[in-house]
Amino acid sequence: MTAAAAHPEFLSYRTKRLYLLISQRIDDELRPHGLGRSQWQILSRLARAGTLTQKDLQHALQVESATLTGIVDTLAAKGWLQRLESAEDKRVKVLEFTPAGRERVKAIPDPYELVETRMLADIPAEDRIHMRRVLEAMIANLEDRS
């Protein structure tokens, strides 16, 4: 690797810097609520779905089973969600909010929305549309096509 590869003029450098700043700001928004990003992602998906199997959540978040189990254990210990046995298959664990967890999540503003609003402040709508198209094209160019 050459020194030039890490040069800040590369778009990949700027993209990573933006990603890190977004991550930091999301963490900043979640900290007062005692949550991390991974916990929020689980709670957010569960809020949209109502209930989810642990396996479905694992696939959606693309995490290892042990990683997800640890995060779910933490959220269950906080009293925010519970694991239930599936009515169809006792081996399958279904996640759902506790009543207290449902109320807590409703009270937390979506950190991704807050950060995106801040990030895009003063950027004209046509630039946002153009940026979205360019980002989608870059993603498509780098996605595995095999």
Image (cartoon, rainbow, N blue to C red):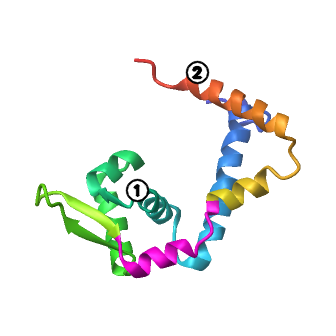
Q: Nearer the viewer, mark 1 or mark 2?
A: 1
Residue at x 58% of width, y 21% of height: 141
Mark 1 residue type? Ala
Q: Which mark is residue 49?
A: 1
Q: Position of residue 74 (x, y in %)?
A: 37, 74
Mark 2: few/some/many CA within 10 Å (<14, 14-19, 20+)? few
Which comes before the other along the chain, label 1 or label 2? 1
Q: Quick one: 120 or 18, which is closer to the camera?
A: 120
In-image side of 94 versus 77 (left or right): left
Q: Which mark is residue 141?
A: 2
Q: Quick one: 118 or 50, which is closer to the camera?
A: 50
Inter-mark Cα distance, 1 to 2: 31 Å
- Res. 9 image quadrant: top right
Residue at x 70% of width, y 61% of height: 114
Residue 109 at least partly seen: yes
Residue 3 at least partly seen: no
Quadrant where the C terminus is found in the figure:
top left
Q: Secondary structure at mark 1?
A: helix
Mark 2 residue type? Asn
Q: Which residues are magenta?
A: 97-111
- Res. 66 image quadrant: bottom left
Residue at x 54% of width, y 72% of height: 106
